[in-house]
């Protein structure tokens, strides 16, 4: 069974962290409705969607991806690079406890889940404004004994590694080469985003389908031309908070013995 951990949009989202975007008004009711439809898409793609308790006072708490890395063997609770997001950890750690044992990233390390892209047993990790070398080395120390290989990737033009590259099939990535050092992905098949849609590389591959924002029809066409099956969701309001489609869930396989 595939689990998708989510959390409802906080009414405080209007005070979210912003790094590369100018603040724009967010329609809260629409954001909540778009998030509900996003969850419905995940359910339709075979996920058992489980909502964490709401955190109404934490503006970015809908973006659960940044707070943990869930590997098959264990969960790693991150230490987000943005101090305002560190209080999100408690309830994420509690919510994951039934599925995995966990480790934590400790100071001085910082790591956002949005900087970790898993491809098989490889963990590409963005070195970004949110994730530092100490955080990457702690992730390496925890995961390499389990058989993972950690590959740091410099992120220059965007918030997280997964703002610029995501997996859309087993050996295929959707990529914006202008924002990262793309050399690490040279061995994988690549689909470049439509040049007029630089933010389109954040897509969510789940159950053989790629969930992609309605705002990027050119990139969607490029994927369909390559045989990728796409499901479109409108996440315009979450995008104003610098969030994409990977950010709003933690998706992993449940294992036998997990408590329901
Ligand atoms: C932040 O700046 O932390 C939030 N406003 C957006 C986080 C988006 N998360 C992600 O890309 N994984």
Image (cartoon, rainbow, N blue to C red):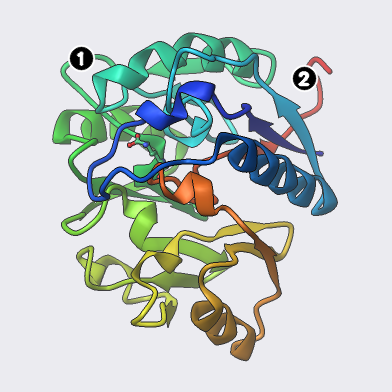
Q: Quadrant of ligand 1?
A: top left
Binning the other alpha carbons within 10 Å of mark 1 as few (below 14), some (14 to 19) or many (20 upward) gives few
Can you tell which quarter of the image residue 36 is in? top right
Q: Residue furthest bottom?
A: 225
Q: How far apart are marks 1 and 2 (CA)?
A: 30 Å
Residue in front for this viewpoint, 175 or 151: 175
Q: Name the residue under label 2.
A: 258
Q: Looking at the picture, how far across and down is residue 68, in whole percent?
A: 47, 28
Crowding at dot 2, Cα within 10 Å, few <14 / some 14-19 / many 20+, comes out as few
Q: Residue at x 25, y 28 (%)?
A: 81
Residues at discs 1 and 2 in contact (Cβ within 8 Å): no
Instruction: Judge whether 123 appears above or below 214 on screen.
Output: above
User: Is 89 above or below relative to 21?
Assistant: above
Q: Image point 61% across, 16% down: which residue?
A: 54
| Quadrant in the picture for the C terminus | top right
**Is 34 left or right of 128, judged from the image as shown?**
right
Q: Is residue 105 visible?
A: no
**Quarter of the image where the N terminus is located:** top right
Position in image of residue 242 (x %, y %): 38, 46
193, 150: nearer the viewer: 193
Labels 1, 2: front one: 1
Q: Residue 21 carries which label?
A: none
Percent of width and height locating residue 11 = 53, 23
Q: Quadrant of residue 258?
A: top right
Which of these two is toward me, 73 or 162? Answer: 162
Look at mark 1 in the image and give the residue it sits on: 107
For marks 1 and 2, the one nearer the N-term is 1
């Amino acid at each position: 069974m595939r689990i998708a951990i989510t959390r409802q949009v906080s009414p405080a989202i209007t005070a979210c962290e912003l790094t590369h975007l100018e603040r724009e008004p967010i329609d809260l009711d629409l954001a909540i409705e778009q998030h509900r439809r996003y969850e419905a898409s995940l359910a339709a793609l075979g996920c058992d969607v489980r909502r964490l308790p709401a955190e109404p006072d934490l503006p970015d708490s809908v973006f659960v991806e940044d707070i943990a890395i869930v590997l098959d063997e264990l969960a790693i609770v991150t230490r987000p690079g943005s101090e305002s997001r560190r209080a999100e950890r408690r309830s994420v750690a509690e919510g994951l406890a039934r599925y995995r044992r966990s480790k934590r990233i400790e100071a001085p390390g910082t790591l956002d889940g949005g900087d970790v892209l898993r491809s098989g047993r490889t963990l590409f990790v963005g070195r970004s404004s949110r994730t530092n070398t100490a955080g990457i080395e702690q992730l390496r120390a925890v995961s390499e004994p389990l058989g993972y290989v950690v590959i740091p990737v410099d992120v220059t033009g965007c918030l997280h590694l997964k703002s610029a590259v995501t997996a859309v099939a087993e050996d295929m990535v959707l990529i914006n080469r202008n924002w990262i050092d793309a050399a690490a992905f040279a061995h994988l098949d690549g689909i470049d985003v439509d040049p007029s849609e630089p933010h389109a590389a954040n897509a969510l591959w789940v159950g053989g389908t790629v969930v992609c924002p309605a705002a990027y029809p050119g990139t969607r066409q490029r994927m369909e031309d390559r045989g990728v099956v796409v499901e479109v969701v409108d996440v315009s309001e979450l995008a104003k908070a610098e969030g994409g489609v990977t950010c709003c869930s933690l998706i992993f396989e449940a294992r036998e013995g997990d408590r329901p």
